[in-house]
Amino acid sequence: MALVILESQLGDDIAFKAAIKKLCSDFADQKKLLEHFLYSIAEQYYKTAFEFEDNGLHEQALKDFSKVTTIWEKITSESNFSSFTPNEGDCCRAGDSYYELGQSEKAIACFQRVIDNYPGYKYTWHALFMIGDNYDALGELNAIAEPEATLKTRAAYAQLIEEYPRCPVVQKAQDWLNSHN
């Protein structure tokens, strides 16, 4: 695990991907341990990405968000990890990372996993808000038709307000709904 962290601190994405590949190879017969390592590494990069953002180091933050999504894609797309189900925090971290990278479709898919699989999660409100925010962004970028984006954003925000009326972003959701009537 230290190799992955050391390699990636150098900012070398090729070395990072090679280190992840080596880690996967070295622990191929210990899937649960490997999955734990990978998610722990992803969580650390997620935290440092926001630390970089807080300190005005946007480019470095994007590199770390990219490392989170690299690990997410490795685990969720390869058949040798098919028995592993990411937890709600893993899904949100991946969704937030895709959001920061401007990959709204992938962000929505991660947040939807939270809604579908973890309805009792304490940050389900965050997932709902981010689904709405990402659909709104897709509409503004003309990546999907504006009426579809508005409909989906409205549905996510209405559900958020109904189910989580005391969450920290309820006013933002309500303001959006008020401005889009």
Image: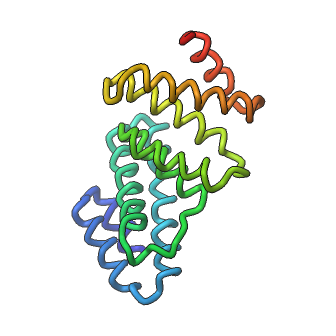
Q: Position of residue 62 (x, y in %)?
A: 35, 44
Reply above or below: 62 against 180. Answer: below
Query: Which one is nearer the viewer's eye here, 63 or 77?
Result: 77
Query: Which one is nearer the viewer's eye here, 147 or 140?
Result: 147
Reply above or below: 31 against 124. Answer: below
Residue at coordinates 51% horizontally, 66% vertically from top-left?
40
Q: Position of residue 17 (x, y in %)?
A: 28, 66
Instruction: Please give left or right for residue 60 compared with residue 157 in the image.
Output: left
Q: Quadrant of the C terminus?
A: top right
Hey, which quadrant is residue 81 in on the image?
Answer: bottom left
Instruction: Please give left or right for residue 49 compared with residue 129 in the image.
Output: left
Reply above or below: 111 against 89. Answer: above
User: Quick one: which residue is furthest to the bottom in this view?
Assistant: 29
Residue at coordinates 48% horizontally, 47% vertically from top-left?
95
Q: Position of residue 55 (x, y in %)?
A: 46, 37
Q: How is the image coloured?
A: rainbow
Q: Position of residue 141 (x, y in %)?
A: 33, 24
User: Quick one: which residue is furthest to the left in this view?
Assistant: 14
Reply above or below: 23 against 103. Answer: below
Q: Quadrant of the N terminus?
A: bottom left
Count of labels shown?
A: 0
Residue at coordinates 39% horizontally, 55% vertically from top-left?
69
Hey, which quadrant is residue 102 in on the image?
Answer: top left
Residue at coordinates 52% horizontally, 36% vertically from top-left?
131
